[in-house]
Amino acid sequence: MFKKLKSLFVIEDANAPQDEKTSSTEGLQTPKTENTAVHKAPSVTPVAGVKGQVQDKFLEVLFEALQSNNQQGFDYLEFKDFLRSLANVPMDDGTRFKSAYATAQTMGATKEKILSSAKQYIVILGNEEAKFQEALSGQKDRNLTGKQDEIKNLEKSIQENEAEIEKLKTDIEDHKKQIATLEGEINTASDKLTQTASDFGATYQALLKQIQDDVNNIESHL
């Protein structure tokens, strides 16, 4: 079924050259009629700087949606099949469409039925495009936005850690300075204590000597 539907629309690779007579847009043209409203599908915003290519995996999804909603009786898809059968017949677009329509009429088809079903298929494709955009948005949230948020959180953590490292470096330098100051104070205090002890010892010895000399003289002379 996939190959049949693909053959109806003459879908080719985006990079492959296409013959003007059998281009993928030829079969989508409809005869111009007065007061006929143009039915447009929701447009898909192209990705800037990225050229898209027709992919079979997406065609299968879209064709499956079209096939599952194929209306009973003769509708646009059957008319499209008639157009395809005339693709290699040398005639202009107008003659080709009229010839296909003449055959379609023998199958009970009407212009209104063909147009209404074609427009319904446009709506179906639009619904599939909406589903795709919703799924794509979910993939972006999981694979892009989520990872971008994770990067931001990691960058914030790095900045916080770097700031903490700088603070630790500053604290270390301050502590080193405090240690140097304390060591200087210790040396000063130690020298002062040593001098004080020496002064006390000298004073003590001087006073002690005088008292001992007096004791010796008293014992000797009295």
Image (spheres, helix red, strand yellow):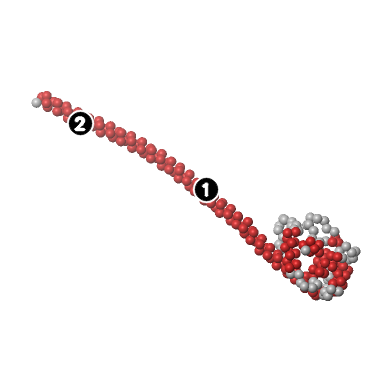
The quarter of the rendered structure image containing the N terminus is: bottom right
Q: Quadrant of residue 100?
A: bottom right
Residue at 58%, 54% in the rendered image: 150
Q: Is residue 128 above or below residue 145?
A: below
Pick the front one: 68 or 171: 68
Picture layout, residue 86 above or below residue 208: below
Q: CA distance from mark 2 to mark 1?
A: 66 Å
Q: Is residue 11 above or below residue 123?
A: above
**Residue located beneath label 2 in the image:** 207
Q: Tell which residue pokes out farthest to the right in this image.
A: 90
> Against 151, is 29 above or below?
below
Residue 9 can be seen, yes or no: no
Q: Residues within 10 Å of mark 2 (few under 14, many from 20)?
A: few
Q: Residue at x 73, y 60 (%)?
A: 58
Query: For residue 162, which numbered disc appears in the image?
Result: 1
Q: x and y percent of residue 148 in the render? A: 60, 55
Task: Inspect the image, locate mark 2, and give the three-letter code of the amino acid beneath it.
Answer: Leu
Across and down, in percent, residue 133 comes to 68, 63
Q: Is residue 215 left or right of residue 150?
A: left
Residue 222: x, y in percent? 9, 26
Q: Is residue 68 visible?
A: yes
Give the label on residue 5, or none. Answer: none
Residue 82 image-quadrant placement: bottom right
Q: Residue at x 79, y 68 (%)?
A: 77
Q: Position of residue 59 (x, y in %)?
A: 75, 61
